[in-house]
Amino acid sequence: MRKENRVTRCIGWIVVVAALFFLGFIVGWFAKPAHPDTVNSSASSNYLREFLGEMQPDLIRQHLRKFTQLPHLAGTEQNLKYAEQVKAEWQEFGLDSVEMVPYDVLLSYPNSSQPNYISIVDELGNEVFNTSLAEPVPKGYENVPNIVPPYSAFSATGQPEGELVYVNYGRTEDFFQLEREIGINATGKIVIVRYGKIFRGNKVKNAILAGAKGIIMFSDPADYWATGVQPYPDGWNLPGGGAQRGNVLNLNGAGDPLTPGYPAKEYTHRLKLEDGVGLPKIPVHPIGFHDAVQLLKNMGGPNPPDNWKGALNISYRIGPGFADNFKNQTVRMNIHVNNQVTRIYNVIGRIRGALEPDRYVILGGHRDAWVFGGIDPMSGAAVVHEIVRSAGKLLSKGWRPRRTIIFASWDAEEFGLQGSTEWAEENSRVLQERAVAYINADSAIEGMYTLRVDCTPSLHTLVYDITKQIASPEEGEKGVSLYESWHKRDNWTGDRDAPRINKLGSGSDFEAYFIRLGITAGRSRYTKNQKTERYSSYPVYHSVYETYEVVEKFYDPSFRRLHAVAQVRAGLIFQLADSQLLPLDANQYADSLTKYAESIAKVAQKNPDEMKMYKVSFDSLFSAVKNFTVASWDFHERLKTLNRADSLQVRAMNDQLMYLERAFIDPLGLPGRPFYRHVIFAPSSHNKYAGESFPGIFDALFDIKNSAAPEKSWEEVKRQISIAAFTVQAAAMTLTPPA
Amino acid sequence: MRKENRVTRCIGWIVVVAALFFLGFIVGWFAKPAHPDTVNSSASSNYLREFLGEMQPDLIRQHLRKFTQLPHLAGTEQNLKYAEQVKAEWQEFGLDSVEMVPYDVLLSYPNSSQPNYISIVDELGNEVFNTSLAEPVPKGYENVPNIVPPYSAFSATGQPEGELVYVNYGRTEDFFQLEREIGINATGKIVIVRYGKIFRGNKVKNAILAGAKGIIMFSDPADYWATGVQPYPDGWNLPGGGAQRGNVLNLNGAGDPLTPGYPAKEYTHRLKLEDGVGLPKIPVHPIGFHDAVQLLKNMGGPNPPDNWKGALNISYRIGPGFADNFKNQTVRMNIHVNNQVTRIYNVIGRIRGALEPDRYVILGGHRDAWVFGGIDPMSGAAVVHEIVRSAGKLLSKGWRPRRTIIFASWDAEEFGLQGSTEWAEENSRVLQERAVAYINADSAIEGMYTLRVDCTPSLHTLVYDITKQIASPEEGEKGVSLYESWHKRDNWTGDRDAPRINKLGSGSDFEAYFIRLGITAGRSRYTKNQKTERYSSYPVYHSVYETYEVVEKFYDPSFRRLHAVAQVRAGLIFQLADSQLLPLDANQYADSLTKYAESIAKVAQKNPDEMKMYKVSFDSLFSAVKNFTVASWDFHERLKTLNRADSLQVRAMNDQLMYLERAFIDPLGLPGRPFYRHVIFAPSSHNKYAGESFPGIFDALFDIKNSAAPEKSWEEVKRQISIAAFTVQAAAMTLTPPA
């Protein structure tokens, strides 16, 4: 009995010990996280709130003030000094690394000993009128050195002399009208066109195609003057003595004209100057409207169509040449521009990602300015500066994003997006493999009305999400979100009940990232009321009057608008870098593709007879878009049931999202434009069609009514339908389960 | 006291319970694996052993027998039937999925009502000699239908008549010698050249450039006859009535000539036939040496240089035309070839990867044959079939590879690598993002001597590893590994003490994967003794005598050589698909690049004066190679300390290895050849330089002594040095730590 007792007791003990051990084992087993990648998403959203809260309007003001004291044209000492300052401050803010990345690219400056001007010359050869050599310098800046006078960068050097012909905006359709309807040939003439509507480089290209031997561009008050606003410094309109600088290249995304496709390093082979990409072969020069009046007022020839008339008090006669008493006068351009290989500097800062250091989210904007860059680009650069400072602050509190964030201060954007393009070329392999998104940060403000966002469709949802977490900067909108304020002012009516988001165009540093490499991209800024304010960009654009004061006095005295833009840009990169699942929405891409396919088919259907005759059908494109839609819907369904604790599965689905944009890249590029490779969003070669769907690849379709060989053009349209259908189909394939 | 006792006891109990629980907890915590990705590498190597052990020589024999019964030219019903059979058997073997993937591509067949032949025509217009219309059919195959007679696929149709000119192998240097040294112009002539040394398409291109109006190619015993071997069926030499079929395109990687860059689907836009890529504009025809003797024996003109003389008992006079009594005779080609868009079928089978289904290892080889395909390609296809069977067996035992394996049976390789290229085009986005490696599986045997491997440098180490685990198939080498057997027969003397591995050239289905997309690639087969056996490829190549029997009787009666090749190919894909860390060796790439840079600089230094005059320097290339070497060394050092339990870190480093080959792709392609994009390994446009370092991009350098404009050529050389340096530098960047 005692023995039995002992045995029972012993067994009891063993059972208890085993049970306790087992209990402990079970608890230990389940207490241990299966993956270190189990994500604390509430910590992440707390940090987002801290990040957005950290940024301060007054610091943006200070950054802007600091970096707009002196002119800092690309390639000048001052722009290098600012680069060094940016680098030093980013380091101080706490980035993991900051480096200067130089390139030697072709820049273009006026010849300091032979100033550029345009003359009216009388029959004796006397210059009876000369345009001004510089803009009147704004008060307070009188003693500032190195203000470059207005000029057209990369203009040919020369002194063409001849009769003027006025060609409105210098668009393709303006030259067509000139030649076909008005019956005037621009060959051998000097054309004068007003700025606006299209990129100035295209005006120059059109003038060259029309046979002109020189081209003058002027800012007409109809295009650079807001109603009821005083000229600077009493308001933000362009004074009559102000003129718009700018490059006149036709690069089509090539970057440095001498090293297309490769980074402009010391060892890089350079094309000869005469073979450089996109360099115009005729002299070009920009003037203000005071000077323009002198050139235009005595012109002869027919009266122009009504829509060719600007707001100057003259009749806008077309020419060629002058009328009546002035018949024997001609116009001479005196243009001396030096193209020279010059060193430029990007500043690249990095925050190393904690879990996926090999995934990059890039925030990049340029630093170089034509003069002070009060708006372009320093309003944007000041915003980036404040974002970097706030990110550094977050780092010091223990935050580290899941993915790597790269901040870039690009150089020589004004000379053809050169700094950003050369860096993209140098890093093309790693960017193609690792870049999650590129957010562009050019000018952060161009108006006082509401937010403007241009981005790829897969970012739409994130943009709406973020703007709902940001306060409206407008007076009297306390408690109203930026989303609501924006929605109220710019509803995407007809399309959907949400704030309007635009397609990404071209002309800023995102080009190489988005249009060449196919990296998800977007940009944001504060803008004017597009419905009522009809002037181009903003009046003082690229003039000496783009000062700190134009922002501080007129555009954003409280700096709350820039602050809101800073929060949008910061919120985008934060979520892209820190969310466990990439916040990209393939369904939005599907929606957009559906609209685009319908819209491009509608353009074609304006020619029902030819459609029949040449057997043109969009069926393959519609079918591909349908497949894409199904694939993206299925993809997002699968995302819902994804085991988020399985880091390989999460990575694989994120890769599908990351590479979605890449799938729209055609490695062969667009016809004749090897660096424009995005089938959905590459720009048209005529910027008239910039807003169209599939603008780049459907040039042949847009041009069809002017085509000299319609059969060939329709054949090309059919070819492009097939390429578009294949590309959308290929993109759909990237969203299906991988095996 | 009693109370105290109870308290003490109670505390004691609590301590014991807590201790036991804690012990359990600790054991539970550590017992649980931190990652499901913790790899059982001994299980993997057991499976590798089982995989290699599963394959059986006799089954390879049966597969070969089964698929060589009937002619199965691309686009014919029989080749579709074999495709269906392959699909059915792969499904039976246990693959996760098998599909047929059709394309509609341009193929080329003789016109059945107008047979192709070449005549000697007398002064009266009588055809006094006609070449044979077909090869004598081998015994046992007399009643087999659909044996296509020898022809040149994609030849132009036409009946050119004129004088013959003999131009040796039809190489660039042969035509140079003809024109410059011998003083004979081939313009308006019919040239006759012997097969061998270079790709037949290049012979045709050279003839066209020389102005010829037709070209005849013949198999000379000097090039298709092994000493001491009987002609088939008594041995494996080419009978005098045999001739070599083959396509005569110059595609440069374009795939289907009508849809370059895009998959040939129903909806794809097709070029017009006259715009098709690489189609020759003159008639072309192949003949055997019995017929060749008749054409050559009466030729007049000068005696040829000694190295122009083949092994026929004639004097190999150069012409033009016939001698003496035959002066008035001419030669007429009667060629009718139909190019037609035809449906072809790839068979694609898959094993889904367990952990990384979005990483692809591809084993692909073609199925279409000119006639029976006894060697080309079915010796390779039979091997793939046995590999698929064995992989299925492994699956049934519970194995599943870490990554996805894709098996491909390509169609229309013989017509310009069309099946493989179209599939690469259709899947280019996912392949670019996900493909780890492509192993090619064309003919598995071309000789009876030893192993031959051509592969990219990063596979060298894996190839050596695998061959050490395989037994030599040679008689009397029991217990000797394939590595040792191979090493003994083909030592890489001078370079290193290891078996020789060749560069990947061109001309088989790996082209689109390796040269266009930059996917790690390799191939293996059994080969002849390259030092002593000087004939081209193997004698019966592309003739009707490529039967099952030629393998079974002569090349591999025991089927142990094919078995060894099967084990090599299987071992490669197994290790690439199943190793936790990719078995790729960047240090081997660094070694090779170092050698290549030295070798290309040596070629240039043959022109020391011009090097000085045009300031040509290879410093940038050497410097880039040095950076690459440091980066790869550092990379492999980091690999040693990698935490293998961290699946994100493992994935990131594997991605660096996977994308290394991709980094050598220049998106702009080589000058004039947009689909040849691999800077290190793209083929030269003259296959004379196929074995050179950087053969593709340094065409200008190889041609320098024949250049009409040396300054321009040297400028191009400098440009290419800069591109090579940049590319190697970019590749080095992909190996550095990502952030």
Image (cartoon, coloured by chain):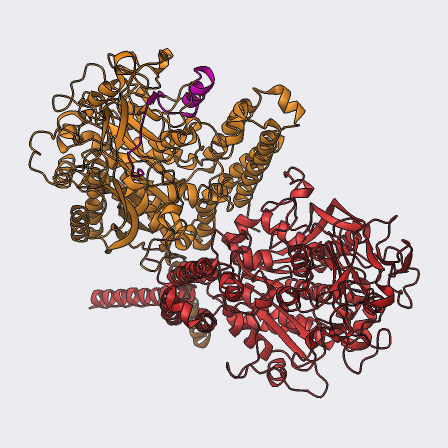
Chain colours: A orange, B red
Please tell me which residue lies in front, B468 or B484: B484
Magenta stretch: give its range.
A155-183
Q: Does residue B457 appear in this view?
A: yes
- Position in image of residue A292 (x %, y %): 24, 21
Q: Looking at the image, which residue sits at the far right?
A: B143
Q: Quadrant of the N terminus of chain B?
A: bottom left
Looking at the image, residue A12 lies above or below residue A59 = below
Residue B651 drawn in magenta: no
The residue positioned 15% from the left and 38% from the top of the image is A147
Decide if residue A140 is on the left or right side of residue B282: left
Please tell me which residue lies in front, B667 or A66: B667
Decide if residue A134 is on the left or right side of residue A166: left
Q: Quadrant of the C terminus of chain B?
A: bottom left
Please tell me which residue lies in front, B20 or B484: B484
Please tell me which residue lies in front, A314 or B710: B710
Q: Looking at the image, which residue sits at the far bottom?
A: B476
Which quadrant holds residue B253?
Answer: bottom right
Which quadrant holds residue A49?
Answer: top left
